[in-house]
Amino acid sequence: MSKAQNTRLHILNKSFDLIYVNGYQATSVDKIIETTQVTKGAFYYHFKDKEDMGLAMIDDVLLPRLNRILINPLSDEGHPLDRIYNSIKTNLLTGKDFDPRYGCPMNNLIQEMSPISSGFKTKLKKVINHWREALISVLDEAKNAGQLNSNIEPNDVANFIIVGYEGLRATGKLETNMNLYKSYIRQLKFYLDNLK
Amino acid sequence: MSKAQNTRLHILNKSFDLIYVNGYQATSVDKIIETTQVTKGAFYYHFKDKEDMGLAMIDDVLLPRLNRILINPLSDEGHPLDRIYNSIKTNLLTGKDFDPRYGCPMNNLIQEMSPISSGFKTKLKKVINHWREALISVLDEAKNAGQLNSNIEPNDVANFIIVGYEGLRATGKLETNMNLYKSYIRQLKFYLDNLK
DNA sequence: CCAAAAACATACTGATTAGTATGTTTTAAA
DNA sequence: TTTAAAACATACTAATCAGTATGTTTTTGG
């Protein structure tokens, strides 16, 4: 990777960390350049404005991260519904990919930015749809194999899983222990078992 | 109500509307006084600082609103699980209490403020616990009447309902129609029916 | 009615914000 | 090695921010 590309990615990665904890609007460009030790000239050479950086961060940091921690594990072996359950359980309980106090990076951005920026809204919709489609793909596989209640729509199940997960990560910001996470995982299992 | 109390409540109500759409940090005190036609002197006479106003807004606007639209309906007649289902379905589909594009006022504040303000965090935790306890109370009633699967913990169910609802309101910010809401309602019914 | 406090009004401050103007240094192709 | 573009650096600006200083007006109890 060229030195310039390295600078660019360094900005994106550090911005992701700062924004994850403090939010997008509360993370100033001055704070980013202070943290990265990159000058303002370099920042605005790589990005037209702050939003341009934020959108690039979604493409180059957030999306690869989502693939790594929630989508790739869906390709493991086993019953499709178990693979979904395990992808979420592992993600929530391993806990090395995030801090529960700061919620879900994707959901944080959806909450803060989608009502006030169509650019963010459009891109974030693509990101969450990417996850939705991955889940639907697994659920379709289950349905075709007769491993999913035939009265149930895979799309509905995917939606229900997503809203439950994101709601957990959202309300989990208020908690100081893992009880809510564990409680959710029990009911997720109950829900998924009833789909078989 | 005294004229002064009226001024205070006017500030809180208009602030709630502005914050609901734009977020707390993005809503400046200048914007609030411009919208309310209240002067800065009046604002800082009633509130020590912006956070003091925000916390009062939770007590005097957000909490009464939550009681009105999600908690009071739990006291209607019928099967406890149906009362829970109806309270949420009515709230989501009547849609006169909010705009889906702007999410859930309580959840918005949790997302934005709880990681950066312990004052907000503590108060918001009380608000969401108030709803949780109302749900648990209804679920306990069901369990005592043999209307709830005896292997299921009311606390787990209450949590699962809350995270699903909040996740829906959160991810629903990205949507332009009611399909996600309807999809969620179908799965909520499926989940609740399996609890009986 | 009268004083004292409550309630409100105006003008300001210093800090922070995103972004720009105008440079210098580094890289890489010819 | 030269040269042009890419990459970075510094100093600034105008707008906006939360909050304050210092007033004036309104309300209220005696």
Image: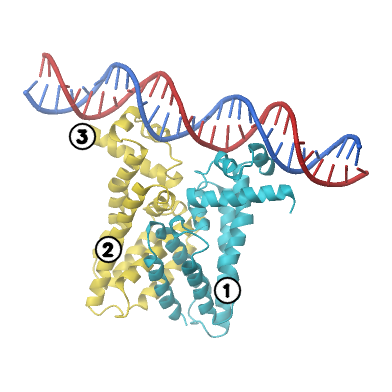
Chain colours: A yellow, B cyan, C blue, D red
Residue B184 at x, y = what percent?
40, 69
Identify the residue under disc 3.
A2
Residue at 27% across / 78% down in the picture?
A147
Q: Which is more toward the observer, B146 or D18?
A: D18
Does the residue at mark 1 contact the one at mark 3 (Cβ under 8 Å)? no
Identify the residue under disc 2.
A133
Residue at 25% across / 76% down in the picture?
A143
Can you see residue B28? yes
Residue A8 at x, y = what percent?
28, 36
Instruction: Kindly identify which chain the residue marked by label 3 belongs to.
Output: A
Could you say which disc has been placed on residue B120 in the image?
Answer: none
Q: Earlier in the sequence, mark 3 or mark 2?
A: 3
Residue at 51% across / 46% down in the picture?
B116
Does the residue at mark 3 contact the one at mark 2 (Cβ under 8 Å)? no
Number of the front mark, 3 or 2: 2
Does the residue at mark 2 contact the one at mark 1 (Cβ under 8 Å)? no
Q: In the displayed structure, would residue A28 be above or below residue A55?
A: above
Mark 2 → mark 1, Cα distance in angstroms: 35 Å
Q: Which three-letter amino acid code belongs to the residue tagged 3?
A: Ser
Residue B122 at x, y = what percent?
58, 54
Q: Which three-letter amino acid code belongs to the residue tagged 2?
A: Glu
Mark 1 → mark 3, Cα distance in angstroms: 61 Å
Q: In the displayed structure, would residue B66 be above or below residue C26?
A: below
Quadrant housing residue A191: bottom left
How crowded pointer 2 is (Cα within 10 Å; few <14, some 14-19, many 20+) is rated as some
State the SS at label 2: helix
For residue B175, side relative to residue B35 (left or right): left
Q: Which is more toward the observer, B170 or A90?
A: B170
Instruction: Kindly identify which chain the residue marked by label 1 belongs to.
Output: B
Q: Which is more toward the observer, B196 or A151?
A: A151
How crowded pointer 1 is (Cα within 10 Å; few <14, some 14-19, many 20+) is rated as many
